[in-house]
Image (cartoon, coloured by chain):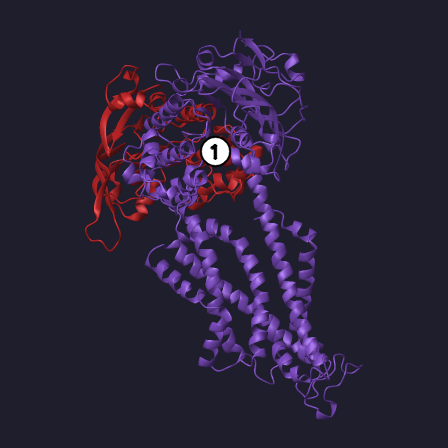
Amino acid sequence: MLKVKGLTKYFKIGPWWNPKKKIAIGIEDITFELKKGESIGIVGESGCGKTTLLNTLLLIYKPDRGEIWLYGRNLITLPESEQRVLRRGFGILFQDPRGAINPRWTVEAIITEPLDIYKTKLLNTERMQLAKEMMDAVRLPYSYLKKRPTELSAGECQRVALARSLILKPDMLFLIDEPTSNLDAINQALIIKLIKDIQKAYNFSILFVTHNIALAKHVTDRILIMRKGRIVEVVESKSLTKGYGSGYIHELMEDL
Amino acid sequence: MNKGYWRLFNDWRFITGLVIISLFLLCGIFAPFLQPNDAFSVDLSNRLLSPDRKYLMGTDAYGRCILSRVLLGTRNTFLLSIFSALITALIGTTLGIISGYYGNLIGKIISTCVNAILSFPPLLLAFGLIPLLKPSLASSIIAVIPILSAYYVRVIQPLTENECKSLYVKYSQIYGGNWLYVFWRHISKAILPHFIVMVTVDAGNFCLIISSLSFLGLGAQPPTPEWGRMVLEGYQYFHIAPHVVIFPGMFIFLAVIGFNLMGESFRDFLDIEKARDDKVLKGDSIHLIEVKREIASESLMPLTGMLDVRDLNVRYRSMPEFPVLFNINFSLQRGKIMVGIGPSGSGKSTLAKALCRLLNKREAIWKGKVLYNGIDLNSLSDEEVMLIRGNKISIVFQNTPSVLNPFLKVRTLFHHIFMRKNQNYLKDERLEEKIFFYLNKVGLSNGSEVINKYPFQLSYGMQKKVALALAISTESDLLIVDEPTAGLDTISKRQVLLTLRQISYESNKSILCFTHDLEFLEKVSDTIFVILSGTIIELAPTEDLITTPIHPFTKELLLAKPKIDRPYLNITLSLYSTYLKWMKGCCYLEICKQRTEKCKNAIPQLEEVKPGHWVACHNPLV
């Protein structure tokens, strides 16, 4: 379903007047494949290119090399308008729950935002119905639709962001960037449980970026270990146990 | 935006301003019908008449009716100033949005031009520009508009830029929202309040500018009735006919006052709205306040440590019914590490601040004792606390990037600390070695590279370490660290925490650390306490607490930590909201599976169940 081949992105560092800029590796030769309903974890220390990979997949950064095949079509060569249509199938969950939603809007406006962007012609009652459905899915009471993000806790904000991404029913892919690193352990467990439940209900694929390998093991089927912009190891989650591997992966696993 | 704008009407300033401005508006619009006499007819036989029946405000040097001229002048001064304020605002806002939205060359050109304009005093610049055109009302406006719109660009540009950088705008853009969408749904909402305030205040400014330019002979030319011009014309007769000056001057005064009152009340209103939002952010759970808890008696814990906290209670003045910290009791021995864990919003950061007396007196009320080596910090004066804080007790805050001054190099940051100890610190030949020594202690071995960098040039993990090194360099015996691992990955986390462990071994320091992160707990701490809803519910040596938790919440919290060799989501998480709930009884009542009648009615006190293991629970899991 999603196939990534040799994806590479370099960054040029230096002042604009300097023609000989240093080149830093963002990501290099990333290749993997994701089937429908499957979930993949991307694990590594900070600065290893996890977020760059995600941003390149979303085409926020223009990749220097490589191909992104989505449903048999190469995203990179498509014109902007078609990219937009395909991106509709993405769900996104960011790391910072408060920063990801506009504090000036009501929860209802936040959740139904994707409908506005795609100019879906819906009656107000249908929109409300959909919003309520989403609130059920993320297990928040309907009374929250009238609240503002400032009145919610961080965990609740993350649920609202999840509901927003779900409202278009992304049937392809859910990109998740460290959704729980700002939350405490219990909120983290609640959000993860929710994501797993929703994945079962909607049968979508997950690309789960995290630095916590134990969390990745419990959420995903396969784990790609990244280091310095490259994939250094691919592990089946089931085979990952305490004594597994050595070196870098061992370092990531310590105390988990 | 429906944040209850009607509340503006509770402000007398807003109502007064509104009344004045609407009166002027009506005068301006209906001036030709309201004027009692012709404003332009010269009658030299009636020069400088005092106010009487026919001429309610008297006549000027040419025998023209002042009331009629002032009313007509409302159009030239008042309506024109509103109109030009709007035009200025539109031009400035558009440019501000463009330069904020496109941070590239266009944005840079616009902001350079704006900087050039802002470097002149505005009126002086206008004086220079007007003679280039022909002195008239129109040319004075044309000269002033670009100058004042520069101020709008200055305000609007960073607002737009911030908004564009935010994740929610990024989200809209990923999903294909174009610039129009982003402007309409996000940016307009962020700038509208500022826009309203600036337009109101600027309309007043324009009143002043138009009339002062006319007063100087640069604006309106005779015989146009204009307030400032009228003051100029009547100025020489002030000693014989003061009304010629006083009436137009009064109108200028009233109009400006009206605008300023309105602008001020707008600004205060928006500030209050913001403050309200901030307050809500601070306490995640104000909406859960239920019943006030009573203050309990002295604790049974013996005084042993270098830091003893006894019955510490903290409330915020904004919500006096709701104790943020409730009867906190613990003791910390020399050379030991104590870790406070708890969900976010349970009062950890407040406790960290309360221990150093960093809470603002205007915001918080506190009671109880914080004994540092037997001295009660809460009984000392502010000056005495200053001597202890920073020398004996140091603190590392949660949000490191905002704590390190971005304008100072790491070297200078250290110098500031040495300066406290010794005024002649620069004469110390081994100054650099000293800095390297502290940087080395936190695991930054390449000290010579680090000290010449600015904080923002370092990665987040390195900033954390530098902040830690700064805290150690004070040579204090007590180190309070708030969330040392927030935002770090597994590997940096371990480095930072092992650094803490090492510091406490090597220099026999006590460390108190607050975190919501459960990784590496057992490696670092000697004692752990669990804090929930501002109360300590369990306090025990690390081994004890991790292997045999007694309070049901602790058990659930420890199970929620993902581990490789343990099934993760089998725990029974029964609720989705926050735990903070204030009741007569136990704060964990609603979720607890073993609750009894007693839990509903009595607050459990911290009691020693096993040696060294304290629990606040009516039905402990022993």
Q: Quadrant of residue B199?
A: bottom right
* CA neighbours of label 1 inside 10 A, class few (<14), some (14 to 19), many (20+): some
Q: Look at the picture and state if A65 lies above or below A199.
A: below
Q: Residue at x 30, y 17 (%)?
A: A238
Q: Colour of chain B?
A: purple
Q: Position of residue B47 (x, y in %)?
A: 72, 89
Q: Colour of chain A?
A: red
Is residue B359 among the parts visible in the rendering? no
* Side (left or right) of A218 relative to B12: left
Q: Residue at x 36, y 40 (%)?
A: A88
Q: Quadrant of residue B32?
A: bottom right
Seen from this angle, which residue lies furthest top?
A: B622
* Side (left or right) of B48 relative to B330: right
Looking at the picture, which amino acid does disc 1 mark?
Asn
Q: Look at the picture and state if B183 lies above or below B588.
A: below
**Secondary structure of residue under mark 1:** loop
Q: Position of residue B620 (x, y in %)?
A: 56, 10
Is residue B483 among the parts visible in the rendering? yes
Q: Which residue is mark 1?
A: B391
Query: Split into 4 quadrants, where in the image is the C terminus of chain A?
Result: top left
Q: Position of residue A66 (x, y in %)?
A: 20, 39
Q: Residue at x 29, y 44 (%)?
A: A61
Q: Position of residue B430 (x, y in %)?
A: 32, 37
